[in-house]
Image (cartoon, rainbow, N blue to C red):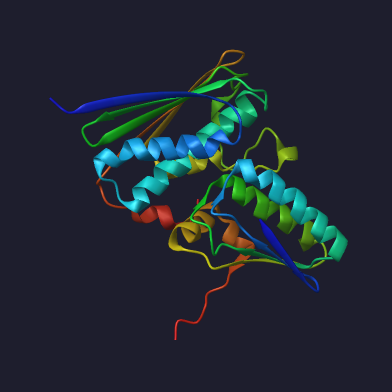
Amino acid sequence: MKNTNEMEIIFDSHSSNEGFARVSVAAFLTQLNPTVEEVADVKTAISEAVTNAIIHGYENEIHKVSIRCRIEGAQIMVEVKDNGVGIEDVEQAMTPLYTSKPELERSGMGFAFMEAFMDSVEVESVPGEGTTVRMKKTIGKGSKLWTTQSL
Amino acid sequence: MKYQVQENCLTIYLPKEVDHHNAEEMRKNADTLIEKNHIKYVIFDFGLTDFMDSSGIGVIMGRYKMIRLIGGEVWAVHTNARIKKILTMSGVTKIMQIYEEDEA
């Protein structure tokens, strides 16, 4: 039987909570003894997902964002969920450099960063109902060389 | 956030963490200074920074678009390993030079 542990946080979609979200997940992650690099990877991925929920999901209105984390053995699963506008075309949204809001000067790298820093990223979205981003990462595998290359 | 203007060069001293939350303010302040002082070179100083997500990349790309029309350049200084990785991965290093100090 693998050891498991779960936590869930729900917070308002204020941009000031982006820092809170990534630090909370990083703190929960410490029980797996991650390297500094692994913590930074997870923090970046969380930051991207939460930022997406705030500016795209809720279009800067204030509603709830929830993060659910589950540790199973050496793997962490993180789910970032909003009940916002949803994504019409998930594949297009995940294309590097694509942004639905060019006027906001986003880089279009959000999902590309999540995919680069986590082992897997799944997106479930229903237009008008919301979006759930589910990411997994196994801690303690050592760093992957390709991640230092340009996407 | 601190900014320094020397002739046509603007240095932006980035905070400890660069995310969407503080990118907005940085963008606004930087653009005001760029327009007012006819800035041609923008230096991003990462000396204090240990976290940056793609929002920071957006800020760099946006400033580059502003100044490249007048032949300007963007530079990064005092980058640690993590920041270098983020910059390299995003591909922004194709338009931005990372200044490496002499190790001698």
In the image, is residue A79 above or below residue B83?
Answer: above
Position of residue A53 in the picture relative to residue B73 (left or right): left
Give above or below for B66 relative to A58.
Answer: below
Query: Residue lying farthest left?
Result: A1
Between A98 and B82, the one nearer to me in the picture: B82
Q: Residue furthest top?
A: A129
Which residue shows up at 55% across the image and 26% down it? A90
- Identify whether A13 is placed above or below B31: above
Q: Quadrant of residue A15?
A: top right
Quadrant location of the N terminus of chain A? top left
Residue at left 37%, top 46%?
A39
| Percent position of residue A145, x then y | 35, 56
Q: How many marks?
A: 0
Looking at the image, residue A81 sits to the left or right of residue A3; the answer is right
Tell me, yes or no, if residue A94 can be seen here: no
Q: Is residue A62 above or below residue B58?
A: above
Where's residue B94, x and y in %? 60, 62
Taking depth in this image into account, of A51 and A134 the one nearest to the observer is: A51
Q: How far from the left and from the top, in percent, is residue B1?
A: 66, 55
B104 or A62: nearer the eye? A62
Left or right side of B3 for A70: left
At x 61% / y 30%, what residue is drawn? A14
Mark yes or no: residue A98 visible. Answer: yes
Figure quadrant of residue A104: top right
Q: Looking at the picture, how far across and down is residue B64, in whole percent?
A: 72, 58
